[in-house]
Image: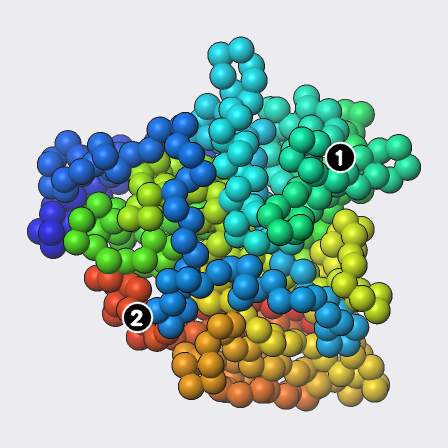
């Protein structure tokens, strides 16, 4: 099998690097490349069972749906481990978990590039798979980002995926449907907000269509104003396309601190993608299916440097993590019977956590979500490495607490505070090694100011933008990594926070 991987890697690297079209969008290259790798593997007969590994569009419920295990427990459940009863959080805030930058079957390139049938009806099974993936990944919300091709033509509440027969509940503002609470099992709901992504702009939380649909394809003061008038939070996707000074100048609320495509592009260039696909198709491979992203989970210097550069110039920008799922790239069944790029699996890999007002209880609204997003009260977690419990990053100044996205003055005495989170579902003795970091944005990237393996407290004496992160060595996943068990000894980023801004 090792020689097969080398053979495939050499062929793909040579052909792809020689022939890749320079004008293609990166997301299209990702799909083309993976499909080419799969075709080459099968055609070369290096790995048996390729045809059996493919799933047709009518596959029911995308496989068995086992959830990622902790400590070898095959009965582990996302619902049990994450959705404990919601109570009042620290400093009066609730931690609400969800997706930002997610495509439904209302995107023209979703569902293996065929979201509609020949009569112009959206693929019913693909819609069911989307609902299923959202509910089984146990997210509290999703901010959709469907492409303008269909999105601009669909009426509300169809843009919200509303289905009365499923038991969905519309959120109304006056006479307008502005969000949808999708009904899941056991009385749970996931809130859906509408949004769009084009090559120019990514507004989320849109409550009604703008009068001029071209605003979905433009990034200028006029289009941003029109979108914000309809309740949108205007973001940018694919940060690799922008330098920090551009992000600081554009009339946007924020941009992505991570998008899966950047990791995939790196894997394409260094041959990791070919090795991974060859391993997946090896009948003797024991890599647990939901951990398939881990071998290609890398941080992007382009994202980190652009992020630091924008904030070092004084810009205040919320940053998000983009799953960017389409269910359109890797129609290959893994050992659990579910395709690699299913919505459920991709939704499980990482999430955005918004801190919303508790209001003395556990209720929150779509407006609470968007307010937290605008204010920068967000941190992102790579949850394939473990669900985090107890992450806290805030500042104290003048006897008051300052949350992520907030500002504090040196004159009030600013201290940053970072608490070590644990992996949910593991006892104290089974916790993997973790490391905290505090960093300041500079024009040359992020400067580490402090690090440690317990809580950190740092008094600040210089204005700037400060963020936190948690890194992890996933020793608790070793038994589930198959031939990639060596990754249990490597350190990965686990949590990115948004910044706290310190002024004179």
The answer to which image quadrant residue 199 occupies is top right
Q: Is residue 126 above or below residue 81?
A: above
Is 361 on the left or on the right of 126, as rendered? right
Identify the residue shown where x is 60% and y is 34%.
146
Residue, far right? 174
The 10 Å Cα crowd at callout 2, few under 14, some 14 to 19, many 20 or more, is: some
Give whichever of 25, 350 is nearer the camera: 350
- Can you tell which of label 1 and label 2 is closer to the viewer? 2
Q: Position of residue 156 (x, y in %)?
A: 75, 29
Q: Is residue 486 above or below residue 214?
A: below
| Residue farthest top in this picture | 119
Identify the residue at image location x=22%, y=32%: 51
Element class at badge 2 = helix
Q: Nearer the viewer, residue 359 or 201?
A: 359
Residue 277 image position (x, y, % from top left): 25, 47
Q: In the picture shown, does residue 106 fall above or below 488? A: above
Q: CA distance from mark 1 to mark 2?
A: 49 Å
Residue that lies at the very extreme toward the left in this rendered image: 3
Location of residue 315 in the rendering, given as x and y in whole percent from the top left corner: 70, 60
- The residue beneath circle 1 is 223
Decide if residue 181 is on the left or right side of residue 475.
right
Chain-order first, disc 1 or disc 2: 1
* Rendered location of residue 433, percent (x, y): 41, 81
Q: Which residue is mark 2?
A: 478
Q: Residue at x 77, y 38 (%)?
A: 170
**Applied colour scheme:** rainbow
Q: Quadrant of residue 40?
A: top left
Q: Is residue 110 visible?
A: yes
Badge 1: residue crowd in 10 Å (few <14, some 14–19, many ≥20): many
Q: Residue at x 28, y 58 (%)?
A: 287
Q: Is residue 445 visible?
A: no
């Amino acid at each position: 099998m090792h020689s097969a991987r080398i053979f495939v890697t050499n062929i793909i690297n040579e052909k792809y690097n020689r022939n890749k079209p320079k004008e293609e969008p990166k997301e299209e290259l990702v799909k083309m490349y993976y499909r080419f790798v799969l075709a080459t593997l099968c055609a070369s007969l290096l790995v048996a069972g390729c045809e059996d590994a493919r799933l047709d569009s009518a596959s029911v419920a995308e496989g068995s749906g086992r959830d990622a295990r902790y400590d070898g427990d095959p009965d582990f459940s996302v619902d049990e481990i994450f959705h404990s009863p919601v109570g009042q959080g620290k400093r009066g805030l609730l931690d609400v978990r969800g997706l930002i930058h997610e495509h439904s079957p209302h995107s023209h390139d979703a569902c293996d590039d065929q979201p509609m049938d020949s009569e112009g009806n959206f693929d019913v099974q693909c819609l069911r798979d989307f609902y299923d993936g959202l509910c089984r990944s146990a997210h509290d919300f999703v901010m959709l980002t469907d492409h303008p091709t269909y999105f601009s033509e669909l009426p509300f509440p169809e843009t919200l995926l509303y289905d009365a027969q499923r038991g969905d509940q519309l959120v109304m503002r006056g006479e307008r449907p502005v969000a949808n609470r999708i009904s899941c099992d056991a009385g749970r709901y996931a809130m859906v907000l509408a949004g769009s992504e084009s090559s120019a702009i990514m507004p989320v939380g849109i409550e009604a269509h703008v009068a001029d649909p071209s605003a979905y394809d433009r990034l200028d003061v006029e289009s941003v104003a029109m979108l914000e008038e309809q309740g949108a939070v205007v973001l940018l996707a694919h940060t690799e396309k922008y330098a920090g000074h551009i992000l600081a100048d554009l009339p946007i609320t924020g941009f992505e601190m991570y998008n899966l495509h950047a990791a995939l592009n790196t894997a394409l260039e260094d041959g990791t993608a070919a090795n991974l696909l060859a391993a997946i198709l090896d009948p003797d491979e024991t890599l647990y299916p939901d951990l398939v992203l881990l071998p290609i989970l890398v941080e992007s210097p382009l994202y980190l440097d652009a992020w630091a550069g924008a904030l070092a110039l004084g810009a205040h920008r919320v940053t998000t993590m983009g799953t960017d799922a389409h269910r359109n790239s890797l129609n290959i069944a893994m050992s659990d019977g579910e395709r690699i790029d299913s919505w459920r699996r991709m939704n499980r890999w990482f999430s955005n956590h918004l801190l919303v007002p508790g209001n003395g209880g556990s209720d929150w609204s779509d407006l609470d979500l968007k307010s937290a997003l605008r204010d920068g009260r967000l941190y992102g977690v790579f949850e394939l490495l473990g669900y985090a419990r107890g992450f806290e990053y805030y500042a104290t100044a003048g006897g008051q607490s300052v949350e992520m996205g907030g500002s504090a003055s040196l004159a009030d005495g600013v201290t940053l505070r970072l608490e070590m989170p644990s992996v949910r579902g593991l006892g104290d003795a089974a916790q993997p090694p973790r490391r905290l970091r505090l960093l300041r944005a500079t024009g040359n990237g992020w400067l580490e100011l402090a690090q440690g393996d317990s809580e950190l407290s740092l008094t600040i004496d210089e204005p700037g933008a400060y963020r936190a992160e948690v890194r992890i060595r996933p020793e608790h996943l070793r038994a589930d990594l198959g031939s990639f068990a060596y990754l249990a000894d490597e350190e990965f980023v686990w949590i990115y926070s948004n910044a706290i801004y310190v002024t004179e």
